Amino acid sequence: MDNMLKERINKLKQERNAVIVAHMYQNDDVQEIADMVGDSFALSKYCMNRPENTIVFCGVDFMAESAKILSPEKTVLIPVAGAGCAMADMITAEQLKEFKKQYPGYAVATYINSSAAVKAESDVIVTSSNALKVIQRMSEKNILFCPDRNLGNFIAKQCPDKNIVIWQGFCPIHHKIQKEDVVKIKDLYPNAELLVHPECTPEVTALADYAGSTKGIIDYATASDSEEFIIGTEIGVMYQLKKNNPYKKFYIMSEELICPNMKKTTIESIVNCLEKGENEVFVPENVAKRAKIALDRMLELGK
C-alpha cells in the first residue's frame, strides 16, 4: 500500500474519530492498516476501551453486531454491507426457539459465530478460545450447543460429565478439510507440526498437534521450537503467522481455504466507509440487552 493511501486513511480516521479493527481472515492489506488485528470477540473488547466514538469493523456482520452490543454508545460501521457468515446463517432465532422447546430445561451455549438475535435466545456465548473453559464451568449439566457441530463435538469429547446436544451447523471452509488431505500434506512435510481450528471435523482435529482458535494457532506457532507448520484454517491467518515468525515456514493445508465474505473488505471499501459513514450497524435495544446478558456470563465464566 502506498504512503498516500495510508495518509488518506489516517486523515479520515482523525476526522471521524475512528478506530479500525480487522479479523485475522481479512486481506493482507486490510490487516496492515488496522489499529488491531485479532479474533472477533477480542476486537469487540478492544473497541470498548478505545476513546474513539466510531468503530470500523473489518469482518463480517455478527462481529460488528458484537462490537455494537458491547459499545452501544459508539457508531459501528462495516465496510461492506451484507458480509455475512455461512455458519451463523445456519441457525435463526426462531429455529433456536424450536430447538429449545424440544429440550426443556437445557441451557443454551452459543458460539460467537451467530447473529445478535440468536445470542439473545442463549444463556451463554462461547468463543473457540474459551469454549472448553466456559462449558466446564457451567453449573448446568444439560446443554444445547449451537451452531457449529465440529466445535461442539470437540468440546463434548472433553466434557464427559456434560450432556451436550449439538446443532448441525458448520463452517464450509473448515469443513472441507478432509482426513485424506491431512495424510497427504503430512507426507509432504513430515517435520511440520499440524495446527488446525476446532471448526474442522473430528477426524482432522484428531490428527493435529494443536487445535485451537486463530489467535491460539498464532501463539502456538510463535512459542513452538518447531520450524515448520501445516496450517488448517482460513488462509488470511498466514499474514500474521509469517509477520510474527519470519524465520519459520508455514504451509497452508489448501489454497482453497478462503472465506469469500471475509475477503469482501478492501482498502477502497474502508476509505468509502470512512468518507460517507455508510453501512452503520444497528442492534435493536431489546435484542442487544438480552444478548449482552449471555456475553457477560461468558466473560464471567471464561476469565
Image (cartoon, rainbow, N blue to C red):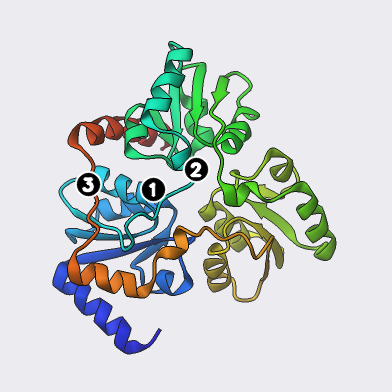
Q: Residues within 10 Å of mark 1 (few under 14, many from 20)?
A: many
Mark 1 to mark 2 CA distance (whole Å): 16 Å
Query: Is residue 222 depicted above or below 295 in this figure?
Result: below
Question: What residue do we see at 63% from left, 30% from top?
Answer: 158
| Mark number displayed over residue 61 | none
Instruction: Give left or right: position of 78 versus 206.
Output: left
Which tag is nearer the camera, tag 3 or tag 1?
3
- Residue denoted by label 2: 87
Mark 2 to mark 3 CA distance (whole Å): 21 Å
| Mark number displayed over residue 282 | 3
- Please indicate, yes or no, whether residue 61 appears anywhere in the rendered image: yes
Q: Residues within 10 Å of mark 3 (few under 14, many from 20)?
A: some
- 265 or 71, which is in the foreground? 265
Residue type at numbered disc 2: Met
Q: Secondary structure at mark 3?
A: loop
Measuring from the top left, give residue 210's x and y in whole percent. Answer: 66, 49
Which tag is nearer the camera, tag 1 or tag 2?
2
- Please indicate, yes or no, whether residue 122 appears anywhere in the rendered image: no
Q: Secondary structure at mark 2?
A: loop
Instruction: Give left or right: position of 183 versus 139.
Output: right
Q: Which of the two discs, 2 and 3, labels the residue nearer the N terminus? A: 2
Measuring from the top left, give residue 159's x and y in whole percent. Answer: 60, 25
- Residue denoted by label 1: 41
Query: Is residue 161 depicted above or below 276 in this figure?
Result: above
Question: What residue do we see at 32% from left, 49% from top?
Answer: 45
Measuring from the top left, give residue 55's x and y in whole percent. Answer: 25, 59
Number of numbered labels in the structure image: 3
Residue type at numbered disc 3: Phe
Question: What residue do we see at 76% from left, 53% from top?
Answer: 182
Measuring from the top left, give residue 105's x and y in whole percent. Answer: 43, 11
Residue type at numbered disc 1: Phe
